[in-house]
Amino acid sequence: MGQILHGSAKTTHANRAELQRSKASAAQLAARFGMNEKTVLKWRKRRSVEDMPMGPKERRSTVLTPVEEAAIVALRVQARLPLDDVYIALKDVIPHLTRSSLHRCLQRHGISRLPKGDREKPKKFKDYEIGYFHIALPSSAMKTAKAFSLSRLIGPASWCLPGYIVRPQNWRQPVSSSH
């Protein structure tokens, strides 16, 4: 089976290894292999004959801000909702969010598929009169997070209206008093 090269490749692994082993000058090797001297020098200074990955070193969204991505990830991890439910919950909070950009964000963070079975049973909230407002923030994230997801449960029907808040730059962790 032959070596598979990408469309822009001008050298094979064997040629690259020869460039690295050879004692000849860069000009002589460039003439021999029919390539630019810069290409010869590039392969000489590399330790491997494999191609380097193309594209940006850190993949990020061109549509979503880092805070919006953090909100999406926090909602997905905490609420463990399916893709469509996360989209419905956040489309009013992030107006430019599309289902495909949401899916790409979840894939980038490695949470596009929900694991089976390790989900704990949901607990029932106490019944309150209409107008009760519940905000749940995970205590483990309070120290390091730049944004928090929050869910508001409204009334006895327990409608969930998710959103997120951004921590101000000068925000400090409140000192908890021991009870």
Image: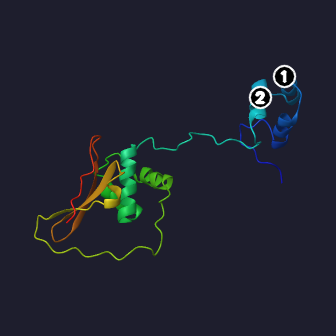
Q: Amino acid at mark 1?
A: Ala
**Residue 57: image x %, image y %?**
57, 41
Q: Which of 108/82 is in front?
A: 108
Q: Judge from the rendering whether residue 19 lies leftward or rightward of residue 151; answer left or right.
A: right
Q: Judge from the rendering whether residue 129 lies leftward or rightward of residue 72; answer left or right.
A: left
- Residue denoted by label 2: 41
Residue 84 visible to an observer of this rendering? no
Q: Amino acid at mark 2?
A: Leu
**Residue 1: image x %, image y %?**
83, 54
**Residue 39: image x %, image y %?**
76, 29
The numbered mark, 1 or 2, whose residue comes first in the sequence reads 1
Helix, strand or loop under label 1:
helix
- Per the rendering, the mark at residue 132 is none
Q: Which of 93/52 is in front?
A: 52
- Per the rendering, the mark at residue 27 is 1
Q: Residue at x 36, y 47 (%)?
A: 68
The answer for how far apart the CA atoms under marks 1 and 2 are is 10 Å
Q: Residue at x 71, y 40 (%)?
A: 7
